[in-house]
Image (cartoon, grey):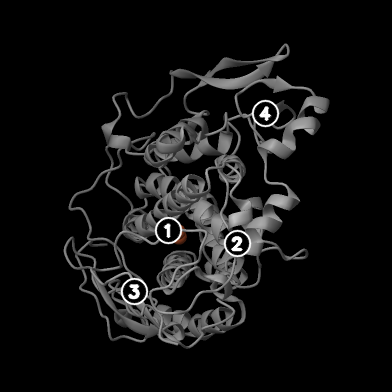
Amino acid sequence: MSTRFTPVDIDAKIPNNVGLADDRRLQRALENWQPRFLQWWRDLGPVAFKDNPVYLRTAISVGREGWANFDHVSMPDYRWGVFLSEPEPDRTITFGDHMGEPVWQAVPGEYRADLRRLLVVQGDTEPASVEQQRHLCLTAPSLYDMRNLFQVNVEEGRHLWAMVYLLHRYFGRDGRDEADEMLERHSGDLDNPRILGAFNERTPDWLSFYMFTYFTDRDGKYQLASLRESGFDPLSRTCDFMLKEEAHHMFVGATGIGRVVERTVELMKQHDTDDISPFGGIDIDTIQKYINFHYSVSLDLFGAETSTNAANYFAAGLKGRFKEESRHDDHRLHDLTRGVPTVAEGRITEREAPLLSALNETLREDYSDDCLPGLTRWNRTLADVGRELRLPHIGFNRAVGAFRDHHVSPDGRLVSDAEWAANVGGWLPTDDDRAHVESLMVGITELGKMAGWVAPPTAGIHRQPVDYEYVRL
Ligand SMILES: [Fe+2]
Ligand SMILES: [Fe+2]
């Protein structure tokens, strides 16, 4: 099969650059799924502003320059489609036991089940986050923010399309069933929940939304980046393009938290106190607790420190490491080891584990490093008031892996049940903290106005002014 590049057919019923028009069966199957997707969007997408024109970015091409178009679109008319990055000529597998062999344009039979699982787990998170965030449009701090929320939502919808295309195209009947089930599982549904725990929690307020896009979308970035390395070329190319869209989601998080911090500092100076709650702000302790919560639940998404699945995926060439080619080792990793955290004899220490089985920990570590630059930036603002935000220790509040059965303080000490119980209210958001944040959430829909708990952004979207009519009411 060739990897010849197909131009984007943007006017097709399903916009695509995968030559859908040449594969009638597949086209019909996806056109069958399309109304079900739209019905899901109506039922479980944003609860309001369902038909208002929103200033959205739509993918129209995959080239390096000008891949997107910005215009007012009513969300049900968004052009959800299937876009793969341009193929890399003569691409070969860069890691694992098939290293050096040409990449696959079809699914190797022996890896069918594993690949299907990877697609389903990734795909399931995409609509899940839309469901988690569906109420937030009612309390957006500005039209600018509401637009960003909707942008994130429609693109997560498109990411579902990306995975559903691969399932339909390469997995036949099983794939179609899996695609249907993506719309049947729902976030928080007790009978039929989403696959990963963190995707069954509601995103209750905008501070949580900014945290989610900063910490949890960043987990998405690392998962996609390691799937981009895949020897299964269509998966690699689809993830490569998804990462382009994903960058904006993390931008929303990083600037969102930055704007909260900025407003907090402003109120602290104005009222000469750390306790700015009475003045309609979110104090630094609360922001820290939200960071502690979202960082720790996002770490759980990487799975246990050591994992046979991760080793198998790597050896098979299905899922690589972050930036696989920039690593200076043999990319097969059979005889190498690394330290992974563990708790032994009452203290936090390390044990040696085969590098191959410790790949989750390697990815987790890359992720943690990538979480730091945001904190450095926010701390520059906080330096004015002599305060600082930190990432908690990786053992803090974990439900998965080595720390699962232990209590670890944010500064990395093993603590007793009693010490945990006595302090947890200072480490994780309490009901009162959440109630306070929720009390600040009032939808602001006037042009150019901003809620009082967050500073305006420094620039608008796509060179538009901050007070632009991002959502037409
Ligand atoms: Fe996504
Ligand atoms: Fe995302």
Where is 305 relative to 229, above or below?
above
Residue 109 visible in this rendered orientation of the protein: no
Residue that lies at the very extreme toward the front in this rendered image: 271
Marks 3 and 4 sit apart, C-alpha to C-alpha, by 46 Å
Callout 1: SS: loop
Q: Name the residue under label 4.
A: 403
The residue type indicated by label 3 comes to Asp
Residue 205: which numbered mark, if any? Answer: 2
Q: Residue at x 32, y 68 (%)?
A: 83
Specify whether 467 is left or right of 45: left
Quadrant position of the C terminus in the picture? bottom left
For marks 3 and 1, give the CA distance.
Answer: 13 Å
Residue depth check, mark 2 versus mark 4: number of the one nearer the observer: 2
For marks 3 and 4, give the one nearer the viewer: 3
Which marked residue is nearer to the observer: mark 1 or mark 4? 1
> Decide: marks 1, 4 in contact (CB < 8 A)?
no
Q: Is residue 158 left or right of residue 468?
A: right
